[in-house]
Every structure is written in C-alpha cells, then in structure tokens.
Amino acid sequence: MEEGRRWEEMPTDCLVTIFLRLGLDDLTISVPFVCKSWAQASLDPGCCRVVDFRTLDLMPWSRFCKGFVSRYSLRSFSFSPLMEFVVGRARGSVTELVFPSSSSVSWRDLVCASVKCPGLKRLALPDHLMLEDELRIPELVGGWRNLEELELESKPSSFLALVTRIGHDCRRFTRLRVSGLITPEDASVMVSCLPELKCLDLSKSYLTKEELRVIVNGCKSLERLAVKDCLGFEADEDVVSMASNLEVFEHQGSKLLDDYGYETDEPEQQSGIFCW
C-alpha cells in the first residue's frame, strides 16, 4: 500500500491554520520542536494574534515553566523573557493581549506590550501592580491607538488619567470592565471622555445610585451595562426604569448594604475575562 502523506510535508498555510487552534503552551514548548517545517510554520505572526497568558500555569515548578526553561536553555523562569519571546514572534500582529493576574508582571513588560503590540484591540491588564507602575499606565496608551476593549482586575490609582488618555488617543474604544470604588469623578470622566462606550461592566464595585444615574444618562451610546453583585444601591423600580433604554442591564446580587448591614468601599475582586 502506498505510504500516506507525512505531516511534515503539509503546506505551511495549512499548518498555520491548524496551529491557530492550539494554545500558547503548545505553540511555545511543543510545536517548534517537532520538525523543521512545524517550527517554521509556528513562526507565522498569525499564530500569535491572540495571546492569553492566563491560560498558562506560571508557577516556576509547573510543567510549562520547566519546559520553557529547558527548551530555551534558561537558568530559571521569569515572565519577562516569555513575554518578549511571544510578542517578538508575533511581529506586531497581536490584537488581543491578556496579562496574567499575578504580580509577576513588571513595568518592563507593560512597555514591551506598548511598543511591540501597536495593533492591540483588546487588553486585560494584571492586578497587583506596583503603585509607581499603576501611576504610569496612562503613559502607555499612546501605543495602543486601535484599542477597543480594556479589562482592569481592579481600579488603578491612575484611573481618571487613564480614561482621559484613552478618550484622547483611542477613537475606537467601546468596551470597559473595572471593579472598585466608583466615585462621582470616575462616573463623570467615563461620560465625558468615552462618548462611544457601548459595553460597561462595573460588577463587584461600590457604586451608588447617583453615580449609576450619571453613567446611564450620560453615556449616550451605552447598550450593555453590568453592575452585578455591587454594593451601594438596590435595583428598585427607579433603577430599573432609568436603565430601560439599555439592551442589556445586569444587576443581579446588587444591594445597598453588605451582609452586616454596613455600606463598604471594599468590594470583592473579580476575576475572569470580560465578555458579553
């Protein structure tokens, strides 16, 4: 019987199509080491348009980290070499970038993303950044002029400046998720600086009815608003009525007081990727 066609003889464009379905771990420590043709195909920038580091176990003792250190002859694992390796292979083609939630991300990594990912449309920033790094995040926005969606694990101390810069530099911006204490100033800056905002997720925040009213009435393009499990307001008839023009209004679990009968400005932190 005639021998079938070998995998390594498959055309590069076909291999790339297959590799698009693989995770970041396979594309980093497995596929490039199978054969020369697979290694060449894995270098196609299209394989790295979506980079989600939260799919990886980045503990130093994990299978992935040990494999990365071994494959690339490193002395030990740290996030920065991985970040530079992945975005370097992408050659500017990354459109979605999800940083890990852990504190392993440095200012250097954020700068790398700003410089080497100019086509970024969706960005999820890490939590637990150093305070000095949080304050400098607005400096990076100019490198992401195509940004459409931003996810913040918790509200950074530079939130007002960040939203202002996004409104100035990112004309296509339409989606935001953030959790934290939403002040009158926060509500006002979102209304004034994000006129095209369509989807807003403030779930697990401290948010009063007054700030909610400012957002609903002021964000004229808003279509979807999630304020689930918030403290500071109850979804009474007045609240439901003010949001009646929205296509989607999610308010399940929101309440005026916490379980002890007190208002609080320390909401639980939310994890996961913002999606509708």
Image (spheres, grey):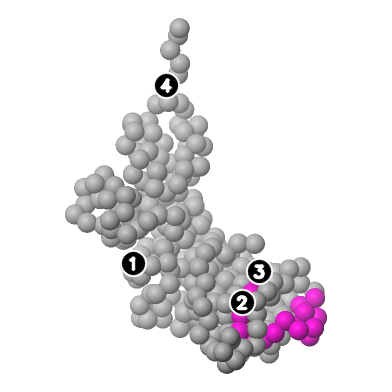
**Label located before the other in sequence (2 or 3):** 3
Q: Which mark is residue 266?
A: none
Answer few, some or many: residues within 10 Å of disc 3's Cα (few below 14, many 20 plus, some between 14 and 19). Answer: many
Q: Earlier in the sequence, mark 1 or mark 4?
A: 4
Image position of 221 with respect to 184: above or below:
above
Compute the Cα span from label 1 to label 2.
29 Å
Circle 1 crowding by C-alpha within 10 Å: few under 14, some 14–19, many from 20: some
SS label for mark 3: strand
Quickly name the residue at label 1.
104
For the record, the magenta segment spans 226-244
What whole-number distance in Å separates the C-alpha atoms at marks 4 and 3?
Answer: 47 Å
State the residue lying farthest toward the left. Answer: 75
User: For the residues marked 1 and 4, what is the alpha-carbon distance in whole angstroms?
Assistant: 41 Å
Residue at horizontal 22 percent and vertical 56 percent from the top = 76
On the image, numbered disc 4 is attached to which residue?
6
- Which residue type does callout 3 highlight? Cys
Amino acid type at image mark 1: Ser
SS at mark 1 in the image: loop
Three-letter code, disc 4: Arg
Query: In the image, what residue occupies the spot 32% across and 59% down?
Result: 59
Quadrant in which residue 254 is drawn? bottom right
- The residue at which mark 3 appears reads as 199
Q: Position of residue 73 (x, y in %)?
A: 21, 47
Q: Does label 1 or label 2 sit earlier along the sequence?
A: 1
As shown in the figure, which amino acid type bears the numbered disc 2? Asp
